[in-house]
Image: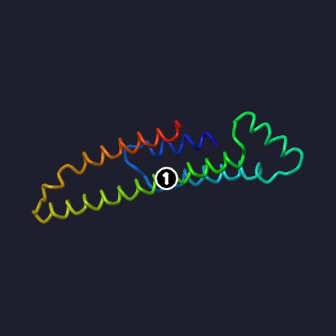
Amino acid sequence: MFLNVDQLEKQLDKEEFQEIGSMAAFRVLETQFHKFIKPWILLNDEDGIVARKYFLKYSKLEVRQFHDTLIEHMESVKKSIDERALHKREYDNRVNERQMQTNEGKVDTSNASLVEKKKQWDRIWKAGYRQQFKE
């Protein structure tokens, strides 16, 4: 599971954002989290009760609370990936428009700083992503 967290982080840290790779890594991780947590919630036999007590002692959280918090964080990560993908598509569209204008000989200089804006947004997004997992 931790290997997949690392893979997702590597996908999100790439200079050139790749929506497909990021979503694939996210889905693998999300599936693993569900498979890990679901049995803990459903077990009502003696072993399940003991396991939940140990989990509470170790984590200071009930299994259900941990599950709900984990799902919230996963939804937040997915939302961030979706937002980043949207920004990349918008950026790519603006770059394509600019290339078309250049080909036509009509360059709109108001979009000259698009590359710098994208880099700045990527830095802000990465800082927010890292902060979210440090909490």
Q: Position of residue 63 (x, y in %)?
A: 72, 46
Residue found farthest to the left: 105
Q: Quadrant of the N terminus?
A: top right
Q: Residues within 10 Å of mark 1 (few under 14, many from 20)?
A: some
Taking the image as shown, residue 45 lies to the left or right of residue 84, namely: right
Residue at image point 13% right, 66% down: 104
Q: Position of residue 85 (x, y in %)?
A: 41, 56
Q: 13 or 132, which is in the foreground? A: 132
Residue 97 lies, with reference to residue 36, above or below; the image says below
* Residue identifier under label 1: 21
Residue 92, quarter of picture: bottom left
Q: 117 or 52, which is in the foreground? A: 52
Given the image, on which type of amino acid does mark 1 rest? Answer: Gly
Q: Position of residue 56 (x, y in %)?
A: 74, 38
SS label for mark 1 = helix
Residue found farthest to the top: 58
Residue at image point 55% right, 51% down: 26
Residue 128 lies, with reference to residue 23, above or below; the image says above
Residue at image point 20% right, 49% down: 113
